[in-house]
Image (tube, rainbow, N blue to C red):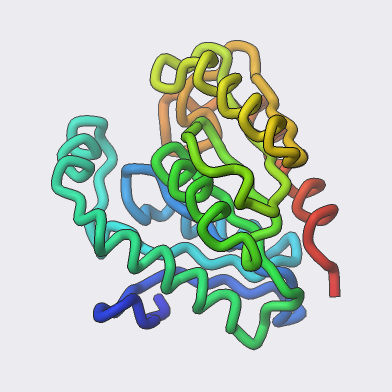
Amino acid sequence: MKTFPAGDRTGNGYLALPEQQHGPGVMVLHAWWGLTPFFQQLCDRLARAGFVAFAPDLYQGRTTDTIDGAEALLEQRDTEAMQAIATGALEYLRAHPAVRGASVAVLGFSMGAAWAIEMASAAPADISAVVVFYGAAGADFAQARAAYLGHFGASDEWEPLDGVREMEAGLRAAGRPVTFHIYPGAQHWFFETNRPEYNADAAELAWQRTIEFLRQQLPQV
């Protein structure tokens, strides 16, 4: 785990470097379970694909593997601390000597997707690509400069497709490049291998699309 300044706090996060020890930067924002092993392993997977991947711990060490536990963590969350950690993590990744390029991508999962969406509008010069997994949110999309890729389950009871389409329309109205994919039969958390909702076919297709998108949007140096 790496530490970094986060306002008047110290944040922690998991960093994975590619074999060549440099590459485009990708920040991973975890779902409401916290920074569990799945998201650390995802950073390792991104590193094997050539990216410098960094996942900040928005919950400061707290994790769970149950919905009841995640709901409790969400109720207890310190939004101010999470904001400071997310902002500090972006600054840490942008300044890391292994990162190539003037901007980075952000991958967000469910709760983390909402953070990714908001951050792209708050830090347009730093974020040039956003990938969201089963999470939609509103933001001032006119302020953003990123391209957007989204992965959503057609059978997701937690993220209704009406909200997904509303976000897609907002992005298009703001002139942002956007591609949203809907996966038939997939539920919320379909990408996460440790969840009963995991859908191997949908997850693999989403991964392939994500890597292709990142390679298109970020410089390969």
Left or right: 147 as drawn, with respect to 71: right
Q: Residue at x 81, y 47 (%)?
A: 212
Image coordinates of residue 80 in percent, x first then y, are 25, 60
Q: How many marks?
A: 0
Compared with residue 89, is residue 58 higher up or lower down, i.e. above or below? above
Query: 81 and 204: which one is in front?
Result: 81
Residue 123: quarter of image: bottom right
Question: Where is residue 26 drawn, in percent x and y?
Answer: 62, 62
Q: Nearer the viewer, residue 195 or 30?
A: 30
Above or below: residue 200 compared with residue 50: above
Q: Residue at x 45, y 22 (%)?
A: 159
Task: Give the percent coordinates (x, y) of residue 34.
Answer: 32, 51
| Left or right: 171 as drawn, with respect to 29 | right
Residue 172: image location, x then y, percent: 71, 31
Q: Quadrant of the N terminus?
A: bottom left
Quadrant holding the C terminus: bottom right
Using residue 37 as the reference point, say whether residue 131 is left or right of it.
Answer: right
**Is 28 drawn above or below residue 68 in the view shown?**
below
Q: For the point 56% across and 75% down, which residue is it?
A: 93
The residue sitting at the bottom extreme is 97
- Which residue is pictured at 46% across the width and 25% down the height? 188
Name which quarter of the figure residue 194 lies in: top left
Q: Can residue 38 be seen here?
A: no
Question: Which one is in front, 148 or 216?
Answer: 148
Residue 28 in view (yes/no): yes
